[in-house]
Image: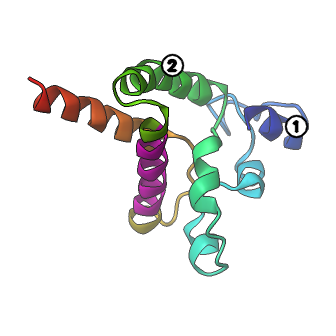
Amino acid sequence: MMFTSFLVNDWRFEPISVNPMLGPSAETLLRLGAKDSYLIVQESEIWRLVSTMVLHAGLIHYLLNMFALWYVGKAIEQIHGFFPSLVIFVVSAVGGTILSAIFLPEYITVGASGGIFGLIGACISDIVLNW
């Protein structure tokens, strides 16, 4: 989706004063499915709960999320396998988007942070249960 967001944003980064993450504009992210509580609730655009996890605010945001996902996701996948890891990631990401829509309704959000934090929680659970 990073490639698509730059395509839709006319192959350019927004100025650093607008988007310090080296990425597209907020309007571009909204067109691609960023979380906007009003659109989810009032316009019934439920698909935004899922699309938000594959969008990123910019190149820096994308690289940091992929770095975290590489290390944490790899550990969880080795212990639990692919499908359970995917379920943990998706349920956590959608849950994070729902919580963001409830507690931060005025902000537009994107990213896989909810899913990554879910995987980190699974790692901590493994450590506690197998100590």
**Amino acid at pointer 2:** Phe
In the picture of the structure, the residue carrying the numbered disc 1 is 7
Q: Residue furthest right?
A: 10
Query: Residue 72 placed where, x, y %?
Result: 39, 24
- Name the one closer to the observer, 53 or 78: 78
**Secondary structure predominantly adopted by residues drawn in magenta:** helix
Residue located at (91% from left, 38% from top):
10
Instruction: Say whether residue 19 is left or right of residue 102.
Output: right
In the rendering, which numbered label is found on residue 131?
Answer: none
Q: Residue furthest bottom?
A: 42
Mark 1 and mark 2 lie on one chain; the one further toward the N terminus is 1
Query: Residue 73 placed where, x, y %?
Result: 44, 26
Q: Is residue 74 above or below residue 42?
A: above
Where the C terminus falls, by quadrant?
top left
Instruction: Say whether residue 4 is left or right of residue 130.
Output: right
Residue located at (52% from left, 23% from top):
64
Task: Look at the image and say whether residue 93 sits in the magenta stretch.
Answer: yes
Query: Residue 24 placed where, x, y %?
Result: 75, 39
**SS for dot 1:** helix
In the picture of the structure, the residue carrying the numbered disc 2 is 67
Give the image quarter of residue 111. Answer: top right
Where the N terminus falls, by quadrant?
top right
Label 1: few (<14), some or many (≥20) within 10 Å? few
First to last magenta residue range: 86-100
Instruction: Say whether residue 77 is left or right of residue 48.
Output: left
Counting every numbered tag in the picture gives: 2
Residue located at (43% from left, 30% from top):
81
- Name the one closer to the observer, 21 or 32: 32
**Amino acid at pointer 1:** Leu
Between tags 1 and 2, which lies in front? 2
